[in-house]
Amino acid sequence: RPMPGTGSGQNFITVNAINAIVSKPGKQPVEEFQWTTKPDYGKTPVYLKQRKAQLNAEREAFETYVRMQQTEAEMQEASVLSDAERKQLLSHLKAKWGKTNAAFQKFSLSVDSQPKKLRKEAMERDLAEMERDIKALERGELVMIVDQ
């Protein structure tokens, strides 16, 4: 800037106008993309709809298959266990449980080898299964035997 009163003879308004016209524009602020302005914002994508339809079709096919298997199983002949047979089966189960329990009680407490451990686990499993069967038979409900 020249000192006042010296006078440079330049027209600063014209010079500034020419500089503004010739100069390159500065950086313009770039607006961030607004995802909420997209036309399909908030809508389920097409590929997810297709996948969901495919899964529903597979589920229905599997349920149909299971229903068919159940109807085939129901078509097999079944007989009802009479009360006398149920009581006889119950007494035999109790006797077998008694023998197995006696053998289990005589078994040593220390299980120092793998075969002993496996034998003890098998006895425990057999006892639990027999107890479950005895409870089911003692309820006195209708027992059906499916012939295969």
Image (cartoon, grey):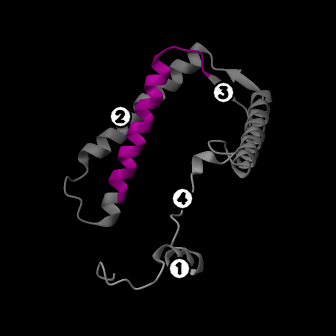
Amino acid type at mark 3: Ile
Work out whether 140 lies above or below 97: above
Q: Does the magenta portion include 29? A: no
Work out whether 9 lies above or below 125: below
- Residue 116's spot in the image, x, y percent? 31, 60
Which sits in the foreground, 105 or 18? 18
Q: Which residue range is magenta in the image?
A: 118-143
- Label 2 Cα neighbours within 10 Å, binned few <14 / some 14-19 / many ≥20: few
- Residue 43's spot in the image, x, y percent? 66, 42
Q: Which residue is mark 3?
A: 145
Residue under the image location 75 percent in, 28 percent down: 74
Q: Which residue is mark 4?
A: 31
Which sits in the foreground, 88 or 139? 139
Image mark for residue 98? 2
Q: Secondary structure at mark 2?
A: helix
Give the mark nearer the N terminus: 1 vs 4. 1
Give the mark nearer the N terminus: 2 vs 3. 2
Report the Cα–Cα distance between label 4 and label 2.
Answer: 84 Å
Amino acid type at mark 4: Glu
Amino acid type at mark 2: Gly
Q: Quadrant of the N terminus?
A: bottom left
Q: Which residue is mark 1?
A: 19
Work out whether 40 lies above or below 95: below
